[in-house]
Amino acid sequence: MQAQPQLQRLLQRQGEIQRAMRRPGGIRITVERELYAIREELKNFPELLQALPSHEGVTHPSDG
């Protein structure tokens, strides 16, 4: 299944960006836009996201 590696990559990158946002200095606006693009892309995998346990620092698109 191609969706799982892509989903894993998206969730990992989302977590990296969210952690970077919490650090002093934050992130660049282009990286923040990437985060929103990732969240939109994650909406294509609702059934896989439901099957995953909740990860710390990872926001599911339905969470906002």
Image (cartoon, rainbow, N blue to C red):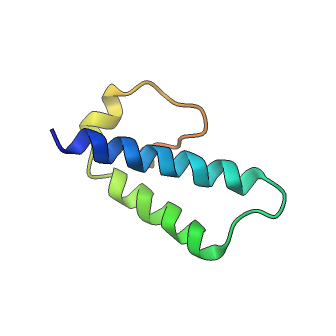
> Going 52% across and 61% down the picture, which residue do you hit?
35
Q: Is residue 9 left or right of residue 4?
A: right
Residue at 43%, 24% (x, y): give it.
53
Question: Looking at the image, which residue is at 54% across and 40% down?
Answer: 58
Give the farthest residue toward the left.
1
Quadrant in which residue 60 is drawn: top left
Q: Residue furthest right?
A: 24
**Image location of residue 21, percent across then percent down:** 70, 56
Q: Is residue 31 left or right of residue 3?
A: right
Spot occupied by residue 57 in the image (x, y as percentages of width and height):
60, 39
Task: Name the residue furthest bottom.
Answer: 30
Q: Could you tell me which quadrant the N terminus lies in?
A: top left
Give coordinates of residue 23: x percent, y percent.
79, 53
Q: Residue 20: where, in percent of width, then height?
A: 69, 54
- Numbered disc total: 0
* 14 is higher (above) or lower (below) than 50: below
State whether residue 28 is above or below residue 15.
Answer: below
Residue 25 is left or right of residue 28, and the answer is: right
Left or right: 58 in relation to 43: right
